[in-house]
Image (cartoon, rainbow, N blue to C red):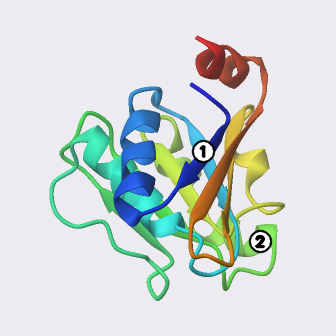
Amino acid sequence: MKRDHVLPTATDTQALGRALADLLRPGDLVVLAGPLGAGKTALTQGIGAGLGVPGPVTSPTFVLARVHRGGRLPLVHVDAYRLGSMADVDDLDLDATAEEAVTVVEWGHGLVEQLADEHLVVELDRRDDDVRTARLVPAGPGWEQRLDG
């Protein structure tokens, strides 16, 4: 899978998420980085669709974390925007589901990487013309191989 993507529409962002879902395995951690409006939730919606989770995938801003079951793998969707420290992350008890699920964390860059030995960072951005971009940054040889395979 290529590392850099231009995403003119939310549908394109969701399609990237569906493609990423094909690579995901139990225990995977995906960290979404980027400014407000860059497409973090749209990407997660695509991941959820690709995993076959039923029901809508919406931003967990106010509940901090949602678990979506019923697909190929459970999807744990976390919004770390209001979390200030690793202690706050620990309070969410994400490792209770980490081994069996895919965990996607919005706003988690620099905060949650230690939850898994390897992870994928998706750096999202929004250009002045409202087109989104995504760069896939693997952390660990397993993700390097999956993206290159």
Cα distance between the residues tagged 1 and 2 = 34 Å
In percent of width and height, residue 13 lies at: 45, 55
Q: Residue at left 72%, top 20%?
A: 144
Q: Determine the secondary structure under disc 1.
A: strand
Quarter holding the C terminus is top right
Query: For residue 66, which quarter of the picture?
Result: bottom left
Q: Position of residue 141 (x, y in %)?
A: 77, 18
Please give the name of the residue rendered at 46% of the width and 88% of the height, measured from the top-left corner.
62
Q: Quadrant of the N terminus?
A: top right
Image location of residue 75, percent across then percent down: 38, 50
Secondary structure at badge 2 equals: helix
Q: Name which residue lies at 33% across and 45% down.
A: 74
Q: In the depicted view, which residue is nearer to us: 88 or 58?
A: 58
Please tell me the numbered disc located at residue 133. none
Of pointers 1 and 2, the one earlier in the residue sequence: 1
Q: Dot 2: few (<14), some (14–19), or many (≥20) neighbours within 10 Å?
A: few
- Is residue 76 among what the camera can see? no
In this figure, which residue is indicated by the disc labeled 1?
A: 5
Left or right placement of residue 79 versus residue 42 in this view: right
Q: Which mark is residue 87?
A: 2
Q: Amino acid at mark 1?
A: His
> In the rendered structure, which amino acid carries the disc numbered 2?
Ala
**Vertical order, 2 against 91 (above or below):** above
